[in-house]
Image: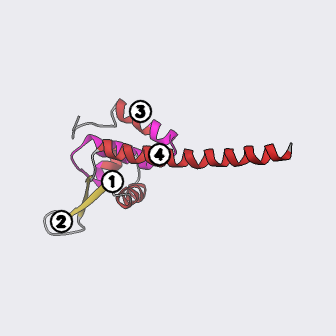
Amino acid sequence: MKRRDSPTLENSANEMVDLLTDLGMDHKLAKVLAHLSQVEESKSTDIERECELRQPEVSLATKDLRARGWVVADERRQGGKGRPVHYYRLELPLPEIMRQVEAQKLEEIGGELQKIERLKALVSRAD
């Protein structure tokens, strides 16, 4: 499903964005991740267009994705003049990224369950 000519995110990518957002991921981050999962690499301007985001939103999302180790950036000069163009691609395969998302959620759930157990202990002492 590596496409370059898709005008907008495909249905499966839109569902992925919705699910990641429901799991607590920032919507813009989820959109960029879904887009990058569909292409080999993408210029920042293509991400803006495909994800319907502004340049600063793309910049922040890609910065966060790079910090997580999920995305890498490559700067290329076009014709030797002007600012370099940033190209982004996934650093990890999407299944590995999903494993990391799952592990983070399981850790969060474990923490919540510990709080519930602590509350139950406090309540049982109060009786």
Rendered position, 62 above or below 93: below
SS type, badge 4: helix
Gap between marks 2 and 1 measured at Cα: 24 Å
Q: Amino acid at mark 4?
A: His
Residue 63, horizontal then vertical, whole percent: 38, 60
Asked if the residues shown at circle 2 and circle 1 are in contact, with their CB atoms under 8 angstroms apart, the answer is: no
* Residue occupied by mark 4: 27
The label nearer to you, 2 versus 4, is 4
C-alpha separation, residue under disc 4 versus residue under disc 3:
12 Å
Give the camera-side residue of 126 and 86: 126
Where residue 15 is drawn, which disc sits there? 3
Q: Residue at x 39, y 48 (%)?
A: 100
Name the residue at 56% across, 44% down.
Answer: 109
Q: Earlier in the sequence, mark 3 or mark 1?
A: 3
Ranked by sequence position, the earlier of labels 1 and 4 is: 4
- Taking the spot 85% from the left edge, 46% from the top edge, the residue there is 126
Rendered location of residue 122, percent (x, y): 78, 48
Q: Residue furthest right?
A: 127
- Of 41 and 67, nearer the camera is 67
Amino acid, disc 2: Arg
The three-letter amino acid code for the residue at tag 3 is Glu
Secondary structure, magenta segment, majority class? helix
Which numbered disc flags the more N-terminal residue, 4 or 3?
3
Closer to the chain start, of discs 2 and 3, is 3
Q: Which numbered disc covers residue 77?
A: 2
In the shown orientation, is residue 78 left or right of residue 12? left
Identify the residue under disc 1. 70
Residue at 80% in and 44% down? 123
> Which marked residue is nearer to the observer: mark 2 or mark 3?
3
**Front of the two marks 2 and 1:** 1
* Corner quadrant of residue 80: bottom left
Dot 2, crowdedness within 10 Å: few (<14), some or many (≥20)? Answer: few
